[in-house]
Image: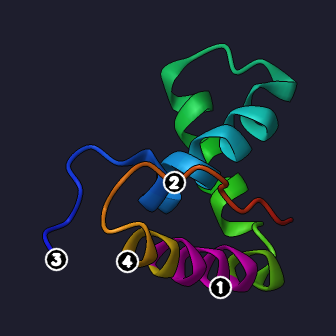
Amino acid sequence: MPWPPRSPDLTPCNYFLWGYLKSKVYVDKPRTLQDLKDAITREIAAIPMEMLDNVMSNFAERLEQCINQQGRHLLSTIFRN
């Protein structure tokens, strides 16, 4: 089956990483571009391994749902922390 184009349901960066980083990085309100880069690097390094394991497990379940839906929109996405 071809990969569904522009599918945020199947992109861990879209369904997890960007929102997670935004919630962490902007807490201290970086003042410079370098502060922002440093905060992003620090927060990525601080993501617990258990959380990453959950994201990858969730990714596999999303792929399975996509196959079951024959590439159509995923009506019920799976969110787990």
Per the image, the residue denoted by label 1 is: 57
Residue 69's image quarter?
bottom left
- C-alpha separation, residue under disc 1 versus residue under disc 2: 17 Å
Label 1: element kind: helix
Of circles 4 and 1, which is in front?
Answer: 4
Q: Which mark is residue 74?
A: 2
- The residue range painted magenta reads 53-63
Label 2: element kind: loop
- The amino acid pointed to by label 3 is Met
Residue at (37, 77) in percent of width and height: 67
Label 3 environment density (alpha carbons within 10 Å; few <14, some 14–19, many ≥20): few
Looking at the image, residue 49 lies above or below residue 29: below
Q: Nearer the viewer, residue 26 or 72?
A: 72
Q: Position of residue 14 (x, y in %)?
A: 50, 46
First in sequence: mark 4 vs mark 3: 3
First in sequence: mark 2 vs mark 4: 4
- C-alpha separation, residue under disc 4 versus residue under disc 1: 16 Å
Question: Is-magenta flag for residue 25?
Answer: no
Q: Are marks 3 and 1 in contact (CB under 8 Å)?
A: no
Label 2 environment density (alpha carbons within 10 Å; few <14, some 14–19, many ≥20): some
- The amino acid pointed to by label 1 is Ser
Label 3: element kind: loop
Q: Are marks 4 and 3 in contact (CB under 8 Å)?
A: yes
Q: Which mark is residue 1?
A: 3
Q: Position of residue 76 (x, y in %)?
A: 67, 54
Q: Are marks 4 and 1 in contact (CB under 8 Å)?
A: no
Left/right placement of residue 23 relative to residue 57 reads right
Q: What is the chief secondary structure element of the magenta stretch?
A: helix
Per the image, the residue denoted by label 4 is: 67
